[in-house]
Image: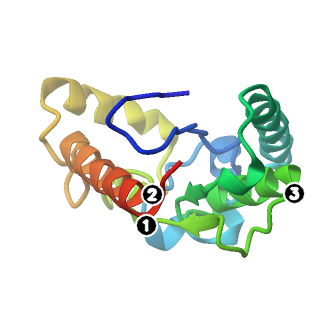
Amino acid sequence: MATLSFLRNRYWVLRHGKSIPNEKGLIVSSLENGVRLEYQLASEGVEQAELAGKLFLKELKENDIPLENVRMCYSPFARTRHTAEVVASTLNLPFEGPQCKVMEDLRERYFGPSFELQSHDKYTEIWAMDEKDPFTRPEGGESVDDVASRLASAMATMESEYQG
């Protein structure tokens, strides 16, 4: 749990569960592919999301945080949407209600067309590029800096829309 005095909210960050692309060893980073149902959670990922939901519920109870104060913001990618749906179900929150919101700025970093749907072994090339310069964009993709800016924008949106 991150608590920074200048923030109006507390944040819990959850990575998606094991996805079908994870199982297949594929890079799926474009919005176009990311939203496809064939790239949602694998069965192990559903179990991971259920466990995460149970642990989060325990954390809420231990900190006396009522469920009505919970807001779930998630990426439009199928794997993150599926994770959010499972967690919402575990918390008994209506997924199609006002407490759950898709935010495009929370999406995966786009690595560009030369990496899209390629083997995840190619990540080593991306990480080497990032290590040299976080401002370098893979051809047609996003740099680390681009993603950091996008996430800062998402945080600003959440801070302006929610309090407590």
State the image coordinates of residue 107 (x, y, percent, origin top left).
45, 57
Quick one: label 1 or label 3, which is nearer the N terminus? 3
Q: Report whether 39 appears left or right of 92.
A: left
State the image coordinates of residue 24 (x, y, percent, origin top left).
67, 46
Quick one: label 2 or label 3, which is nearer the N terminus? 3
Residue at 22%, 61% in the rendered image: 140
Say if mark 1 contacts mark 2, CB within 8 Å: yes
Name the residue nearer the viewer: 28 or 11. 11
Q: Which residue is mark 2?
A: 107
**Can you tell which quarter of the image residue 100 is in?**
bottom right
* On screen, residue 159 above or below 126: below
**Can you tell which quarter of the image residue 54 is in?**
top right
Q: Which residue is mark 1?
A: 104
Q: Which residue is mark 3?
A: 92
Can you see residue 155?
A: yes
State the image coordinates of residue 37 (x, y, percent, origin top left).
69, 70
Residue at 52%, 68% in the rendered image: 33
Indicate the secondary structure of the residue bearing disc 2: loop
Indicate the secondary structure of the residue bearing disc 1: helix
